[in-house]
Every structure is written in structure tokens, then in C-alpha cells.
Amino acid sequence: MAEVTLDDVRHVAVLARIAFTDEELERLTQELQNILKWVDKLQELDTEMVEPAGPMVGTDPERRGDRVQPSRPAETWRELASWCDEEGFKVPRVVE
Amino acid sequence: MGSQAREWTAKEMAIQIREKQISSVELCRALLEEIQRADQRVKAFITLFAEEALDRAREMDSLLSKGKAPSPWTGVPIAIKDNLCMEGTSTTCASKILEGFVSPYDAKVVSLLKEAGLVILGKTNLDEFAMGSSTENSAFGPTRNPWDLKRAPGGSSGGSAAAVAAGLVPWSLGSDTGGSIRQPASFCGVVGLKPTYGTVSRYGLVAFASSLDQIGPFSRTVEDGAALFDLIAAPDAMDSTCSSRHRTPSSPTLSEGVEGLVLGMPKEYFEGGLDPEVKESVMRGCEALESAGARLQEVSLPRTEYAIATYYLVATAEASSNLARYDGVQYGMRKGTEEGLRSLYENTRREGFGEEVKRRIMLGTYALSSGYYDAYYLKALKVRALLREDFQRAFESCDLLITPTTPTTPFLLGERTDDPISMYLSDVLTVSANLAGIPGVSLPCGKSAQGLPIGFQILGKPFEENLLFRAAWALETSLGTLGVAPLDEGDIA
């Protein structure tokens, strides 16, 4: 099993876009290590010839007709964020 | 009338309303008073719609008096889990990150409840984003088990289960991703159904793990559970995984019995860390079904021991992707705008998510990341296929499977919060049904010497909820229900 290092966890935190303190990262490294050690049990099973599970069997999904439907007015979504105005959602500047 | 109303089933309420022995307003007011009184201790609700619910009840009374009731359930109160959107109300998912979020639309199930004339009294507590097995991972504090306030109600739909067990509502809705309806139903001594994947629309249910999530009913009787399931199981073009197949309602066939049915007892579910009292009680349930005419047969689901590990990879991987949307840009909490866009994302998520949610996002992101995808996520999908195969094989020789719902009776609040793996193992007997997409129901089969509920699980082939309910009804007819938890003045942890 792969050893989970502090650097791995730091990298995963960047991918997950969550800020952690060094102390929290150290604790997470230990926790993920424990969970993955336990999850490693799956390696006991030979799955070389097994196809990964696809969408759920037996469902017969309802398909929508390809028709334009009315959508909710932009105001509906603007009301959810005080930082949204006529032009859109305001975010910190990304280009100078 | 207040405490009396707590005891009534949804069916009894519907009949009394229809026969004008009570109005919907009187009934809803009585239950709202009960909630005000008892929920200080149980903490089942996050939001109560006191005024709005009474207005709605008044509207239903008026329709009833004009003979225009939209369904036989008109005016009957209900509660819904707070990960279901209801227009104009907050949906918190028990998370700080959805602070200030007001649902712009109704979930499909909420529309169906409204169309049937039900009155939604409030939204119930859960583990944050439905991630947990005890309703302790809530930004609003834990819910307590009405049978013993020092103990956990199970989770993640602990609020919905506890509200029904305490008689604060006759029925409620929850969601089940790995056992989040059946495990709290077992802990709280009520009936809880996880339908076949694709039977109930997930439109408006806040996504946790999309290939596993299903909405289902809680109730104190099998009859009420079947009736609520019949109300919410409908095709929906807004959920591309929702089945359009015609289904026959479950309620009319409830009493058809189990004569001649073959009930499989998966031996792996009766081994290992099963509490002897749980085993004894479930065995009595099995014998009751045998006496009712079913034939019992031992079967094997040989790969059961791999289910929890598979679940915690598949569910966390899907969660890491589904929860990427909470980034402080479009709604909810927003932190860290001063230091740039990355900081906005990272600090909003740092402040907004609780510890368990972060842990699961990290695990899921890790399992999907470059270099680990094959070893973890892909491997889990392959084992998921094998678990599904186990069920297909078992169902070749039996009609239903009967098992305990949980290996133990309800644990103490705080008992498992420091050890994620021991908490994950609470779902060891329920996760397989989600991985295989099959339906499962839990109903009480007795109590332990300490007076704690014990749950009996029945699993079926896809779309065979009617058979599930028939067996559940037969068991309930033989063993009785637990009724409403007395809520004696007890110690509060």
C-alpha cells in the first residue's frame, strides 16, 4: 500500500481547495493513512477480469424531449448572493 | 389533545380530518405545541414553519369543506430532512457553508407532498451533507434518540427518524446513501424505506453521492410507510436517473402475506460483531415470518466484508466532486475575498465545512487523484460490480433477504465521534443495498433489555418494494409496532 505523506496530503488539499493549518494537515495524514490501510483490504480480491460497475441496472430513465423550456429569471439567482449585481457574481480580481 | 395527537398514525389523522372530528389547523397546532415542548430535548428540527404551516392547514381545511381535497391525505402534517429544497425556505444541510441560502424551487418530492395536500411542519436535522451515522456532525448540534436521550438517533437522517419516534410528526422524509434512512429507523424504532435507485426523483435533493442517494419515507407503521412511498415514487424528467416504468402502488397489496415466499438469510450478516441481543431479536423476527408461511433459507453474499471499504471510496469520490460547487461564488457563505480567488475558495471551504465533510472530500479527492485512481476508485467500482453480482446470485434462490439492520443497539452520543472507522462500521449491514441499487426497509423487531429498539432489515430485488412491504407488514402484524417513545424526563448527556 502507498504510504501517505504530508506532501501528498498538502497536494490533495490544493486540489480540494480547502485551507488547512500544518497541524490539521498532519492529523489528516494520519487519518487518511488509517482509512486507506483499512480500505486496502480490497486488494485481496482479484478484479483483473471484472468490468467496473456502470450506471445502475434496471432503471429506465425518463428522457426529456429536446425542447426549449422557460428558465427562472436571473433575479432568482441574484437574490441568493448579495455580491451579485446586474453584471454577474463579483469575485476577487484574477488579472491585473 | 396534544399528547394524544402524538400517538396517531398518518392514516388515523387522515380519517379524523376527513370525518371532520378534527381540522388540519387543530391537528397541526397540537403537534407544533408538542414540538415546542419536546424538541428542546430531542432537537429533531432545524427549522419550524409554525405560521406558514398553519396558513397552509387553513387552506387545506377550506378545500376539505368545499369537497375539493386533493388526496385522502389532505391536511396531514409531515416533516422533511433539511437537504431537500422547499421554495422560499432555507436549506442548510446542517452546514455553515449554506448560511443564508434560500431554496429557489421545490424538490420533486416536496411538490408531490404539496400536490397531495400535506402540511410540511418543518425541516429536520442531519449529519452535515448527510455524511455520518449519528446526526452528531451537524452545525446545529446533535439530535437525541427519543428512546434514550443520552444515545444517538443514528444518521444521517436522525432528525427525521427521531421526530417520528417522538410523535412530533406521524411520518417524514429522509435520504439514504449508505444506510441513512434504515440505520436511524433501526435506532429509533420506526419504519424506514430506501427505495430502489431511480424510483424517487432526486431533483431538489442536495447531492452527496449521486449514484447511491435515494429519498424515502419514515413512519411508525408499515401501512403509513407504504402510503408515503406511493405518494413520492413518480417519474420525473428533471432527474435523468429516475425510472419512467409504470409501478403499481404498494398499499393495496400490503396484506397479501408471505405464504410461499422464500426468505434468504445471508450468513455473513449474522456473523462477526453482531450484538447477541440483536441477533436473538432478529431471529425471533425470522421465526415469526416462518410461522406466517414463508420458507427460510440460508444464503451467502460472500463479498460482504468488502462493502464498507468500497462504499467509502465510491461515496467520497462522488462527494468530492458534488461538493466542489460550494466555493463562495454563487450562494451561501463567503470568506477570504481580500486575498484573491484561490483564497476565496480555500477559506470559504475551510470555514464553511465541518471536520467530517472535509475528511471525506480529502479522501475522495485522494482516491480520484492522478496515480491513485486505478488503485482506489477504479478498484472500488470493480468490487461494486462483484457486490451486485452477489445479490443477483442470492436472488436466484430466494425472493427477499432478511437481516439485522445494524450490528448493535444505539450507541451513546460521543462514543464514536473520535474514531471515523468505528462510525463507518455502523453502516456495515446497510451500504451493500446502495452499492447494488436494491430496495431495503428497516422496521422494529423488538427492544433490548435496556429498552433500546432493534431493527430488522428486508432487502429485495430492484423495483420489488411491494413485496418488501408485504413481508414488513406480515412481520409487524406478528410483532406489533413500538409506538411513540414515552420521552420520560431523563438525563441529558
Image (cartoon, helix red, strand yellow):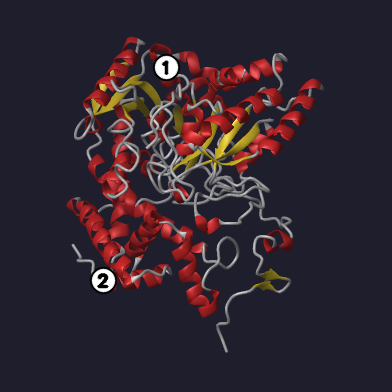
Q: Is residue B268 left or right of residue B175?
A: left
- Asked whether the residues under marks 2 and 1 belong to the same chain, the reply is no
Report if residue B464 is visible in the image: no
Vertical comparison of B172 with A14: above or below: above
Task: Look at 54% across and 23% down and name the residue there.
Answer: B224
Residue B32 at x, y = what percent? 62, 30
Residue B114 visible? The answer is: yes
What whole-number distance in Å separates the C-alpha atoms at marks 2 and 1?
53 Å
Q: Is residue B12 above or below residue B241?
A: above
Residue B204 vs residue A66, the one in the foreground = B204
Q: Could you tell me the amino acid type at mark 1?
A: Glu
Taking the image as shown, residue B163 lies to the left or right of residue B425, namely: right
Give the image location of residue B282, x and y in percent. 29, 22
Quadrant (top left/top right/bottom left/bottom right) for the C terminus of chain B: top left
Nearer to us: label 2 or label 1: 2
Helix, strand or loop under label 2: helix
Q: Vertically, is B380 above or below A21?
A: above
Give how far across and how far down residue B156 sits, in percent. 43, 42
In the image, what residue occupies the spot 35% across and 11% down? B293
Q: Residues within 10 Å of mark 2 (few under 14, many from 20)?
A: some
Label 1 marks a residue whose chain is B
Identify the residue at image location x=68%, y=48%.
B88
Crowd rating for badge 1 (residues with CA inside 10 Å; few <14, some 14–19, many 20+): many
Tell me the chain of label 2.
A
Question: Mark 1 = which residue?
Answer: B476
Element at label 1: helix
Tell me whether circle 2 and circle 1 mark residues in contact (CB < 8 Å): no
The quarter of the picture where the N terminus of chain B appears is top right
Foreground: B192 or B307?
A: B192
Q: Which residue is mark 2?
A: A6
Q: Amino acid at mark 2?
A: Leu
Residue A17 quadrant: bottom left
